[in-house]
Amino acid sequence: MEPKVLDAETCIEAAVRFFREEVRPNAQKLDNDPEALRQAIKRLGELNALSIKRPLKYGGPAANPNQVRRFQIEAARASGTFAFLATQHQSATSMISDGSNETLKQEYLPKMANGEKLLGIAFSQLRRAGPPVLTATPVDGGYELNGLAPWVTGQGIYRECVIGATLPDGRALLAILPFPTVEQSGLKPSPPMRLAAMEAAQTISLQIEKFFIPNERVVDVKPMGWISRSDEINVALQGYFAIGCAWAGLDVLKDAADKKNLEFLYEAHAKLSAEVEECTETLRVTQEKFAATQEDPPERLNARAWAIQLAAKCAHAAVVASSGAANSLSHPAQRIYREALVFTVSAQTTAIMDATLQRLTGVK
């Protein structure tokens, strides 16, 4: 029986209302309480919005780029921690959708929008230069994994993850791995990391020794250099989380302006809002140009760097407008300032690092 297809606009509207009415008012709690964060993910699943880019064949809603952009901005504006965690599952959905294992697609994709299946991701190690830190060796019936997955987010929230490991010929294996909460045969998770921001998302490192992955759990085998190409495609898309963080800072700035009734705070809010809107449009235009031509305009990297700069600038403006209260861990300006740090380095490549530093040093 064909699955019922979700309507994208209805799904996105429901998610945005959830972000504004339930997530943002509880953002401070979500920043500190893994259980509250788990419940928020569960609630997004109840809205069938955990996999907004899932193909129509598996129930949709197959959101278009404009809808995805709105989802990402509104999620990060409401709570950076929530947005960071939720996007792990969205990425896992896309990896399975784009993979070659049709059996896994049938098993997982129909259950990923509502949260029956919850998966994180663990492939940042593929970006590392030098010898691979996590390897996959072909063996009878599958692959043996050895090494370290240094960043895996969602322990106790996600039950599995899509992991990336390097094959002897340089290709990348993507496979579904159990997400352990305690040490088990071949898998040794660290305690949740102490982090300056988004600690409630329960990020760990995972030591893997002689862990067998059967062929049936392989999502795909990607060509050498796949991760670099994937990062090129997602340059602008990742920028929308920074834009959401910038708007979160501006929300705090506006609240401070209303409370203190100081004209210069309103002026700062207006100027920064106009710049955020301009940057968002630049991200959109450059991404559409890249999608149409597959030629990467240099302004696309510059737009991502601009979004990163704005996240930090607007968060800093929120701190300034909030005065000494911003130094309290319970103040939203403090949280957003730390979230800007994460959105600065998320999915960072050397090209993004270079573009960001050039912008910060006055070279655009």
Image (tube, grey):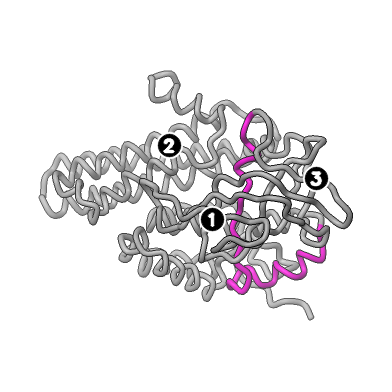
Report the Cα–Cα distance between label 2 and label 3. Answer: 38 Å
Residue stretch rendered in magenta on the structure: 101-129
Label 1 vs 2, first from the N-terminus: 1
Residue toward you, 225 or 251: 225
Q: Reply above or below: 27 against 262.
A: below
Q: Which residue is drawn at 56% across and 28% down?
A: 350
Spot occupied by residue 81 in the image (x, y as percentages of width and height): 42, 55
Vertically, is 7 above or below 78? below
Task: Assess whether mark 2 and mark 1 are in contact (beta carbons under 8 angstroms).
Answer: no
Of the 4 image quadrants, the one containing the C terminus is top left
Report which residue position mark 1 lands on. 87
First along the sequence among labels 2 and 3: 3
Label 3: state its secondary structure: strand
Mark 1 or mark 3: whose residue is earlier in sequence = 1
Q: Which mark is residue 308?
A: 2
Give the residue number, with chain letter if any, for mark 3: 137
Task: Find residue 129 and report its horizontal and vertical position in percent.
Answer: 63, 29
Q: In the rendered view, would you say 238 is above or below 24?
A: above
Mark 1 or 2: the one toward you? 1
Q: Is mark 1 on a helix, strand or loop?
A: helix
Residue 303 position within the rendered picture, expressed as x and y whole percent measured from the top left: 49, 33
Q: Where is residue 131 in the image (x, y as percent from the top left)?
A: 68, 31
Q: Visible in this render: residue 325?
A: yes
* Disc nearest the viewer among 1 and 3: 3
Q: Which amino acid does label 2 sit on?
A: Ile
- Residue in view at x 68 percent, y 42 percent: 134
Tag 3: residue type?
A: Thr
Residue at the right extreme, as displayed: 140
Q: What residue type is labelled 1?
A: Thr
Q: Is mark 2 on a helix, strand or loop?
A: helix
Q: Answer with left or right where residue 263 lies relative to residue 218.
A: left
